[in-house]
Image (cartoon, rainbow, N blue to C red):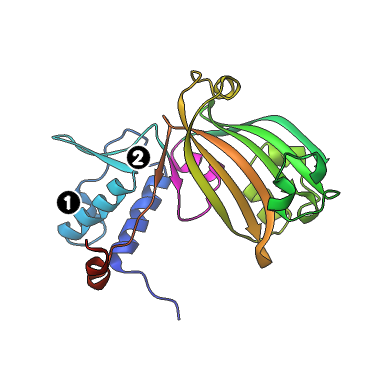
Amino acid sequence: MAVRASFHQQLIEKLRQLLRSRQFAPGAKFLTEREIADRFETSRPTANKALGSLVSAGLLEIRKGAGTFVRESVLDYDLERLVSFTDKAKASGKKPGTDLIEFRKITAAEAAPGIAERLRVNPEANLFYMERIRLADGAPVIYERRHVVAASCPALTKTDAKGSLYAAWTTKCLLQITGAEETIRAVNATAALAKHLQIRHGTACFQITATGFIKDDQPLWHEETLYRADVYEFRNRIGGLGAAMGRMVGA
């Protein structure tokens, strides 16, 4: 039996939908605590709590003496679930785009060392290799190198690679994406990567190395992706410790 979301969670989702609807542009003043309480027929403490959750999630910001505003300029990376860049950019009020640098079919033997092992394929297996720059309002924010198991999505095309791969995989190739294993670390951009992202050589960035899976824990893709740290924030909600656990770790 599905567990019904609490009213607080429902209210947060309604406010998220309001933000996604673009009724409030980035930088615009958002509803006040009283306006939320009146509009959604709830108490002001509940409205305040929901606003606080959206501030913590990085969707809103409080400006002292002025009110609560829709946050702008920062793209949010969800550490709890896979979200396509296209959807994330649109949700942030930005126009997504892609510069496809390279798209070709290679064998696993031609790929960089370790790729065949990560994708669990033979050296003779065909892979799609692509390099892409993802754009938000025309500005480069992500540089990506990706290898994809061709046998799992043989109909994938260069046109698909210019848009959302998640959309192509799930709607065109009818694949079920079950998750991904990611490693995130801080790096300084090399001269070549800095040129792609239009930043200075040595600028701090986030590097994500990830392998994505479809049903039966079968690898579909492996990627090495560089995110500009000045336009991306990585956010996650971490659960608390129980009393017994707190005593055990000496907290």
Residue 38 appears in view: no
Classify mark 2: helix, strand or loop. loop
To which residue does mark 1 refer?
34
Determine whether, in the image, residue 44 is placed left or right of residue 198: left
Q: How many marks?
A: 2
Kind of residue indicated by mark 2: Phe
Residue 21 point in image, percent of width and height: 42, 46
Picture disc at residue 24: 2
Kind of residue indicated by mark 1: Arg
Q: Which residues are magenta?
A: 76-93
Number of residues whose C-alpha sits closer than 10 Å to that of mark 1, classed few (under 14), some (14–19) or many (20 or more): some
Residue placed farthest to the bottom in the image?
1
Determine whether, in the image, residue 236 is placed left or right of residue 105: left
Residue 4 point in image, percent of width and height: 38, 73
Residue visible at 16% across and 57% down in the picture: 44
Q: Quadrant of residue 102?
A: top right
Residue visible at 20% across and 46% down in the picture: 32
